Image: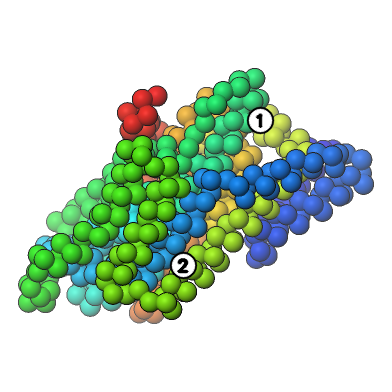
Amino acid sequence: MTELMALLLFIAICLTLMAGYPVAFVLGGVSLLFAMLGMLMGIFDMGFMGSLPSRLYGIMNNQTLLAVPLFVFMGVMLEKSRVAEDLLESMSRLFGTLRGGLAISVCVVGALLAASTGVVGATVVTLGLLALPTMLRRGYDPAVATGTLAATGTLGQIIPPSIILVLLGDVLGNAYQQAQTNMGIFSPKTVSVGDLFIGSLIPGFLLVALYILYLIGVAIFQPKKLPALSQEELGHLDWGKLFKALLPPLVLMVAVLGSILAGVATPTEAASVGAIGAILLALAKRRLSLERIKEVCFSTAEISAMVFLILIGASLFSLVFRGFGGEDIIHDIFNSLPGGVLGAFLLVMLVIFLLGFILDFIEITFVVIPIVGPVLLGMGLDPVWLGVMIAMNLQTSFLTPPFGFSLFYLRGVTPASVPTIQMYKGVLPFIAIQLTMLVVAYIWPEIITWLPEKVYGS
């Protein structure tokens, strides 16, 4: 009976979320209702909830999670400072005379923004507003143009400093310790946000390279879809202006990621460096005002409050789910699957991919990963490799029609003259590239694990 209640709890939460109710209150409210129902039926011990206060205190006192509002602040401040606008204008003049040069510029700018902000929605909308009208006006195929923008905007999911990697680092760190405890291993070794940041660098920039190769292929074999622009249309290339546009985000990226790679700062400390750097950058561009700081602070507080409320609700759900024996159910299901570890891994990736259509990455991270993480890690999977694979999987889900979040973001800023079906057609090649990258990273996990081992020597 307890196992049935665990399954019903999970189903009830998914159905309530799909009905559109606030995530944090669904997780906490439905879990409490099931806990009280289980207590009345005599199958749930409310004493199991005794660890909830210490868990909530641990969330509020978690130094790793402090990086979330700092990275959000950095991303919003850079968005308000119009860094993307300056970058795109300069890069377009550099590459625009080549076939597909404008699309390649979008890829480069998107990668730089991802490595500077880590906020997917803001990147997609910003690139869509700035680049799409120009691309359509210059004769670019609408499918290729929208596909490039949607795919490039989602790079913030995998290229650090990614918010999802910060959250995954905390959740997987707890799952790894839980897996060790379940196996009777008491070791201080865990997985950190820094591990995931470093592990995602190579696959992230490989994706950028593959995107650009695809666009070059389209420019060669279907040149009408990606026309070249004349120098007169683009205007004079000012190398000084290009340098000034490129230098600030590059310096910020090196300051944030470089301090982590060099071991001189934790991800949280690096996030504070990034936040201060974003303020200085806005000041240098003369786009810093009291009103702008107020806007950025309000946006940061809103997003951060949402993240932490969801995390509190997810902690309550996790406790109740375990109290009904849900973790044992997951363990039994995984062990009975054909294919062993591979079968379990593929099932989890499929579930996460499908949930990515209806849930945001924050909900998936806090609801699904605490359930399946300890079981998968207990089967011997590397936590850094698993975290980066999950991030890439969610990135692919964000692009996949008809429910991909990036498509929704881009649809909001795309002219009505571009039908939605064109956007769906445009993202299909990029989805194929990302699925290929997932397969390659599965066959050669060293793509993810090599750099962290070199940096940390373990």
| Spot occupied by residue 333 in the image (x, y as percentages of width and height) | 66, 32
Q: Is residue 219 left or right of residue 423?
A: left
Q: Is residue 417 above or below residue 267?
A: below
- The picture quadrant where one finds residue 27 is bottom right
The residue carrying pointer 2 sits among few (fewer than 14), some (14 to 19) or many (20 or more) residues within 10 Å by Cα, namely: many
| Residue 174 position within the rendered picture, expressed as x and y whole percent measured from the top left | 59, 36
Q: Residue at x 45, y 70 (%)?
A: 296
Residue lying at 66% horizontally and 25% vertically, measured from the top left: 182
- Who comes first in sequence, dot 1 or dot 2? 1
Up-down: is 410 above or below 445? below
User: Residue 331, labelled with which disc?
Assistant: 1
Tell me the kind of residue under disc 2: Phe
Residue 163 seen in this snapshot: yes
Residue 293 location (% of width, % of height): 43, 72
Helix, strand or loop under label 1: helix
* Visible residue check, residue 399: no
Q: Of helix, strand and loop, which one carries label 2? A: helix
Along the viewing direction, whichever of 106 and 165 lies nearer the viewer: 165
In front here: 209 or 267?
267
Q: Cα distance, mark 1 to mark 2? A: 36 Å
Q: Residue at x 40, y 33 (%)?
A: 442
Q: Which residue is mark 2?
A: 408
Q: Amino acid at mark 1?
A: His
Considering the image in quadrants, where does the C terminus appear? top left
